[in-house]
Image (spheres, helix red, strand yellow):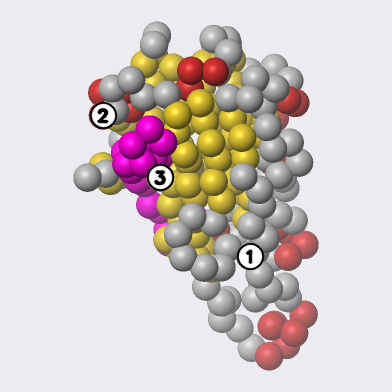
């Protein structure tokens, strides 16, 4: 049975799944309609489909993003090492189950990648007047691809994220030959994914 994490909790992935090598990172969300009058709805894009984008940022041991190739997203679906492969962008978030999936092969990850940050951000949030206050049931789950068993799930949602346009959902951190997962749930108010990368490089 999968472990359900709360914000700020950490688990050892290797302890929960010995010999873990290949992971599927599934992310999903639901979007609620923003309440407002006729004119508000007429001149706002808040009720249009959200385009939430999942991405992975690879971070070196000095806590920096070394190269643009270390950012895996809809515009760069495969890491140069083939260790991380994004399965493509879901433009609406409609339907049940995972909205986007990212495959991670821990065995192929270069040794100088110390941490993997898993991000979800809203496309063009300021022009569309959209934020995570309109998102419900956002989750991340990790599945061991060797046996198809879900290892861990972290769900976040609610008005506490109103005004936030990106989310650090979780971080995977290398501990020697082992890996930990931290449930972050850290909301950010930024224009785009590049701004999130810049925050890691400060």
The magenta region covers 142-162
Task: Mark yes or no: residue 200 visible.
Answer: no
Q: Position of residue 123 (x, y in %)?
A: 71, 54
The image quarter in which residue 178 lies: top left
Q: Does the magenta-highlighted stretch encompass residue 156?
A: yes
- Of callouts 2 and 1, the N-terminal one: 2
The image quarter in which residue 16 lies: top left
Q: How many marks?
A: 3
Say which residue appears at 48% left-offset and 22% top-offset: 106
Q: In this rendering, would 41 be left or right of 118?
A: right
Most extreme residue toward the left is 1
Q: In this rendering, would 138 be left or right of 196?
A: left
Q: In this rendering, would 171 be left or right of 152?
A: right
Q: CA distance from mark 2 to mark 3?
A: 14 Å
- Of callouts 1 and 3, the N-terminal one: 1
What residue is shown with label 3? 141
Could you tell me which secondary element the residue under label 2 belongs to? helix
What residue is shown with label 2? 16
Please state, as top left, top right, bottom left or bottom right, where the N terminus lies in the image. Answer: top left
Say which residue appears at 59% left-offset and 30% top-offset: 84
What residue is shown with label 1? 92
Does residue 44 sit above or below 28 in this rendering?
Answer: below
Does residue 157 sit above or below 142 in this rendering?
Answer: below
Numbered label attached to residue 38: none
């Amino acid at each position: 049975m999968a472990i359900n994490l709360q914000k700020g909790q950490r688990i050892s992935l290797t302890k929960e799944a010995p010999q873990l090598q290949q992971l599927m990172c599934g992310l999903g969300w639901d979007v609620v309609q923003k309440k407002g009058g006729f004119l508000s709805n007429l001149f706002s894009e808040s009720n249009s489909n959200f385009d939430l984008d999942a991405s992975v940022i690879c971070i070196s041991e000095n806590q920096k993003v070394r190269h643009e190739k270390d950012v895996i997203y809809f515009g760069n679906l495969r890491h140069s090492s083939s260790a991380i492969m994004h399965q493509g962008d879901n433009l609406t978030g409609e339907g049940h189950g995972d909205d986007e999936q990212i495959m991670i092969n821990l065995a192929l990850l270069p040794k100088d990648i110390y941490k993997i940050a898993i991000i979800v951000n809203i496309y063009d949030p300021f022009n569309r007047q959209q934020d995570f206050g309109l998102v419900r049931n956002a989750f991340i789950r990790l599945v061991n691809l060797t046996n198809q068993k879900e290892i861990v799930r972290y769900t976040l949602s609610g008005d506490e994220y109103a005004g936030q346009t990106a989310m650090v959902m979780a971080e995977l951190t290398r501990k020697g030959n082992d890996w930990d997962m931290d449930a972050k749930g850290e909301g950010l108010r930024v224009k785009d994914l590049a701004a999130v990368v810049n925050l890691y490089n400060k």
